[in-house]
Amino acid sequence: MIKLGTFMMPLHPPEKDRTECFEEDIDFVVYADELGFTEAWFGQHHSLGWEPIPANDVFISTLIPRTKNIRLGTGVSIIPQHHPVNVAMRTAFLDHLARGRFNCGFGQGGVPTDWELFDLPDPKTQGLMTVEGIDLILKLWEAEPPFDFQGEYWRIHMESQIPELGLGTYLKPYQKPHPPIGMSVIKGASMAARMAGQRGYMPLSTNLVPISTVVEHWPTYCAGAEDAGKPEPSREIWRVSRTILVGESSDQMWDLAMNGTLGRSFEYFIALFKSAEMLSLFKADPGHSEDDITPEYLLKNLCIIGDVKECTSQLDHVWETTGGFGTLLMMAHDWDDKALWTRSMDLLKNTLLPALPRLPE
């Protein structure tokens, strides 16, 4: 059966008490673990009121003793905002604390106010920093000192050791050679998807583009694998993210979506993407104008909302259109009505998912 995980940005109204938000996020992951969700990924942002977790590794560390089976992942560690040595060591430490129940994600980040906060260069340069940073992290996890890795943006070297004192010894991951690595994929012809395919990383397709864009991610990923001379990848490695709200009553679910924080969150995304001149990514049809893009438009074109029958049909459409994938990542949203949101998680896991087709063996 297809696996079910979750991706938590998280999403909370800016006026909501932060401590309450974080406690709710913890409760969400604990409940997902109890239901049998297989993995959870957590975002990281420093200057977004709607997405208030600035340190996903710290958040994961609080979840390790509270959960039993669910794999926990950084989604993602934003490389230009950290020194690669720091990312390598903190990630390795988390891997040990979790005894290998850990995935790691690397990425660039796309928040202009975060770029200002860290005084970062233009996005293209940040992309180059991200690739270099990932390479340096992987080298650190494999190398033994002495070494001297000279990059364009960072130099990492260790030449002085006293092995008998442990001086010059640093922590490496629990999982060998390292935890499974994921990369977030947004655009259809995504460089991230191609790089992930070249390196064998897990592709995590975003929830913020229509399925007509998501279908491009897998061929792009496979093209990357072919570039690197790798065998054809298994679709089991592909994660596809969607916002899903299912209940006994379609009218009730749509009322919650339109008039609750879910609808408000899309007002936020429209403003955010417009400021970054990325609004076209939302279009379900290239012929649609930017004026067509409203919260209701996004709820209808990016989300799966309704009663069990309607949502099963919509999920079937996603499956058939994409050709299938290994893990469905349900997006976490603010629990403005906890009873309805937890019921939705239960129905998705125990009713909708078993009805989906399986990937061929």
Image (cartoon, grey):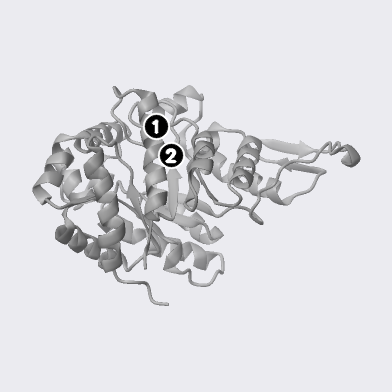
Q: Residue at x 23, y 49 (%)?
A: 302
- Quadrant where the C terminus is found in the figure: bottom left
x then y, percent, for residue 293: 17, 41
Image position of 358 with respect to 142: above or below: below
Image position of 315 with respect to 262: above or below: below
Instruction: Say whether marks 1 and 2 touch (CB < 8 Å).
Output: no
Instruction: Give the mark nearer the N terminus: 1 vs 2.
Output: 1
x then y, percent, for residue 65: 53, 42
For numbered disc 2, what is the local secondary structure? loop
Q: Does residue 294 appear left or right of residue 19 in this picture?
A: left
| Residue pointed to by mark 2 | 43
x then y, percent, for residue 247: 18, 51
Q: Does residue 151 appear left or right of residue 127 in this picture?
A: right
> How many numbered badges does the structure rendering display?
2
Q: Farthest bottom residue?
A: 361
Q: Does residue 1 appear left or right of residue 125 in this picture?
A: left
Q: Residue at x 52, y 57 (%)?
A: 201
Q: Does residue 104 appear left or right of residue 324 in this picture?
A: right
Q: Which three-letter amino acid code belongs to the residue tagged 2?
A: Gly
For numbered disc 1, what is the local secondary structure? helix
Q: Residue at x 15, y 59 (%)?
A: 310
Residue 266 can be seen in this image: yes
* Mark 2 closeness class: few <14, some 14–19, many ≥20 residues within 10 Å: many
Q: Residue at x 56, y 45 (%)?
A: 131
Choose between 300 and 294: the one closer to the eye. 300
Q: Which three-letter amino acid code belongs to the residue tagged 1?
A: Glu
Q: Farthest left residue?
A: 251
x then y, percent, for residue 265: 25, 35
- Quadrant where the N terminus is found in the figure: bottom left
Label 1 vs label 2, nearer the camera: 1
Which dot marks residue 176? none
| Residue pointed to by mark 1 | 23
